[in-house]
Image (cartoon, rainbow, N blue to C red):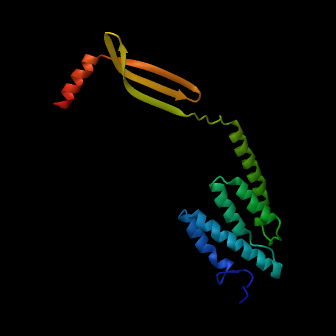
Amino acid sequence: MRKKPGFYKGKHYTEYVEAITSLKRKGRYDDAESLLLMLLDATEEEDCVEHMGVAPWYYEQLAIIYRKQLRYADEITVLERFAKQRHAPGVQPPKLIERLSKAKGLLEKQQQRKDKSPPVLSAKIAVGIDYEKMELGESDIHGLRVDTQVGDLKSSTFHPVDADDSDERNKRGNN
């Protein structure tokens, strides 16, 4: 069976206005986006047959969603798609063309901010701690050896612990 131009899932695209409004109100922008993309196809298919121009509301709603999500490149894409279509009469088409210009400015500002932001530095940090006994002839030194590495820089330090204190702590801990 052949699909009628302007229809999606058996309903004319104009019957989805409340569904789109409801999805947006509930914050279900991904679902609204998916539905709107299907309805853009439906309005464009209908225009190919009827030659009345596309319905701008659907493009505008998708552009609004993209703007809320700071997805300026996607907003520009949908508005450029609109600009290439035959337009229905009314005040909305010129407003959407103006919105396209504003979206391009916002994208440019967004890219400039990204260019100016400081680079994210990352370094591997490794720390190793070992209990050691350093034998020094008559007296042994017990302590902790701490090895650290940040990037290519390596460091090793030894922190002596009085053996008598550590033995005393062990005795207290075992009681």
Q: Where does the image place residue 28, in percent across and percent down from the top left?
A: 56, 64
Picture quarter containing residue 33?
bottom right
User: Could you say where residue 32 lies in the image, as x and y percent from the top left?
Assistant: 61, 67
Residue 154's place in the image compared with 59, above or below, is above
Q: What residue do we see at 57% from left, 33% from top?
A: 123
Considering depth in this image, is 33 or 151 the residue closer to the camera? 151
Task: Name the image quarter holding the N terminus.
Answer: bottom right
Residue visible at 23% across and 26% down?
A: 170
Q: Which of 81 and 167 is in front in this view?
A: 167
Q: Which residue is drawn at 55% across and 62% down?
A: 27
Q: In this view, does 67 lie to the left or right of 25?
A: right
| Residue 133 x/y as whole percent | 35, 20
**Furthest-front residue in this view:** 137
Q: Which residue is drawn at 21% across and 21% down?
A: 168
Left/right placement of residue 175 relative to residue 71 reads left
Measured along the vertical axis of the image, is residue 11 above or below residue 112? below
Report the residue that reaches farthest toward the left.
Answer: 175
The single residue placed furthest to the bottom in the displayed view is: 1
